[in-house]
Amino acid sequence: MELTRLTAAQLSAALAAGEVSAAEVTRAHLDRIAATDAKVHAFLHVAADAALAAAASIDQRRASGERLGPLAGVPVAVKDVFTTAGMPTTCGSRILDGWHPPYDATVTARLKRAGAVILGKTNMDEFAMGSSTENSAFGPSRNPWDLDRVPGGSSGGSAAAVAAYQAPLAVGTDTGGSIRQPAAVCGIVGTKPTYGGSSRYGVVAFASSLDTPGPFGRTVLDAALLHEAMSGHDPMDSTSIDAPVPPVVAAARAADVSGMRIGVVAELSGEGYQPGVTSRFAEAVELLESLGAKVTEVSCPHFRYALPAYYLIAPSECSSNLARFDAMRYGLRVGDDGTRDAEQVMALTREAGFGAEVKRRIILGTYALSSGYYDAYYGKAQQVRTLIIRDFEAAFGQVDALVSPATPTTAFGIGERADDPMAMYAADLCTIPSDLAGNAAISVPCGLAPEDGLPVGLQVMAPALADDRLYRVAAAAEAALTERWGQPLLRQARGLDA
Amino acid sequence: MAITRDEVAYLAKLARIALSDAELDHLAPQLDQIITAVAQVQEVAAAGIPPTSHATGLTNVFRGDEPVPCLGPEAALAAAPAVEQQRFKVPRILGED
């Protein structure tokens, strides 16, 4: 049995049946990381000893007859934006290099409580700002389909780890598409839950009104299992929604779209979309129709303003949030030679500790919030946010779920967009509307673009707290497509064969 | 031009980032391009449309004011760049005079 090829659901069943131990499963994944991560660079920190100790503890508890949850003994990789007691947390930044947080994020704590085995911390664009992991201070991760391509971002390390069979599951965060875009370009499943459905406590803040933790898996059911385990109300996060977690696992198992009304978003297509993305998306829509969904075209006229609104709102919030990195209580301190005052040390530390994209966004946000520009930029962006929410409300008055491509193009080359911010930002064109509206969305693989042989993602969007609809649609598409392909799409990934 | 090199230098000062001249030369035209692009929001955001600051609609979220265990001084200071007498040691914050 090749343990790293099994899904989380299969591992869960094998563990429960006593066919395999958590220690064996963990060791197999640690071996896979050791064998492949020099090429993929998905991890910033591998917690081998802690993982093996956690696995041994699960095995012991199971042996003593304790009833354990579905993720007990299943390995998971954690984006380096979640605080983890006993492990470093860097957010891909020099300014936090070597920082060991004194507490666990709620998501980290819930994974531990569920018995999931944390393998380590995954690479990311610095402070989650980027779409390629090239903004990591510790070097980019690589796409397991083609090592010269990016794995997407900002949660690119988490996506690459799952696509490279280093972990069956991973957690990430989505602020403008940072889960769905890497999932799409790595050929796996990734979900942005409803904003407030998963806790931000202990997630190093980028843009607080948008940041949403969520799951990655190789199958829709695996993503649902992790979604359920990591989500739910948290009194430590004042924006957490006090409502039950939607029945995502049941929906993934149902995989039934018959009678569902599905809207194709007219504005998320056309110019700037790669032909192979457009054709695979169109086939996926036809497939959903053949499975019994009622498909119509829906117009969301303000979505074209989502990207500009996002690049005002997110930098504004980031410029405020990242003010905490002041070299005083934790993190890097540069230039404290006894002659400089605190403000000079702050400025030197932030100059040395932040990368180019983080500086760009802090300055952009400082501009948008400054006196004289606030109304013209930040204020207008907040109004556009209202218009986008209204577009969604009108659309969800007609249909149960919306679909679009998850990204306009497949994975681009490493270095290709590194110094062209606007080209890089366009990678999140399809994913940003759901972040601004705070609703739920998923990306599920829907084939390979003929021109480059790289994966394309189908995005499904649902109203806030209707996350189960995502899984219903994505699981139906996955089942029908896998039957058509004769095997899971990821089996065709060849980047690590050489 | 939406933003000048001098304005970027001033914003960097406000944001406490000691940008080098080379970085300023590089960043200023990029920020000008970005600001020109994001200014599109001004085309549609007519007066009377209410702003949205966050999407949940939650207001005034409370939880019980109950004492819970917190970090001890050792844990709280463990990541500090400099410590003196069980306190964070920081550079001077006032001028010489």
Image (tube, grey):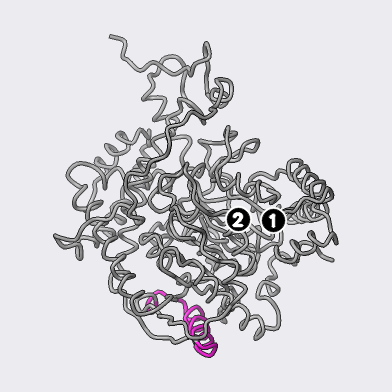
Does residue A248 appear to the left or right of A316 in the view shown?
right
Is there any visible trace of residue A95 in the rendered image? yes
Mark 1 or mark 2, whichever is nearer to me = 1
- Classify 10 Å Cα crowding around label 2: few (below 14), some (14-19), many (20 and above): many
- Classify 10 Å Cα crowding around label 1: few (below 14), some (14-19), many (20 and above): some
Give SS at disc 1. Answer: loop
Q: Is residue A406 magenta?
A: no
Disc 1: host chain:
A
Magenta region: A269-292
Question: Which quadrant is the N terminus of chain A positioned in?
Answer: bottom right
Does residue A455 appear to the left or right of B41 in the view shown?
right
Residue most extreme to the top: B97
Q: Position of residue A436 (x, y in %)?
A: 36, 60
Is there any visible trace of residue A498 in the rendered image? no
Q: Is residue A282 magenta?
A: yes
Alpha carbon separation for disc pair 1 and 2: 9 Å
Does residue A455 appear to the left or right of A378 in the view shown?
right
For label 2, the residue is A229
Q: From the viewer's perspective, is residue A157 above or below residue A224?
A: above
Of residue A427 and residue A120, the one placed in the foreground of this image is A120
Disc 2: host chain:
A
Rendered residue at 32%/54% (across/down): B57
Rendered residue at 67%/47% (across/down): A120
Q: From the viewer's perspective, is residue B38 above or below residue A470?
A: above
Q: From the viewer's perspective, is residue A441 above or below residue B84?
A: below
Question: Which quadrant is the C terminus of chain A positioned in?
Answer: bottom right
Q: Assess whether mark 2 and mark 1 are in contact (beta carbons under 8 angstroms).
A: yes
Of residue A107 and residue B42, the one placed in the foreground of this image is A107
Q: Position of residue A114 (x, y in %)?
A: 66, 51
> For the residue marked with disc 2, what is the amino acid?
Ala
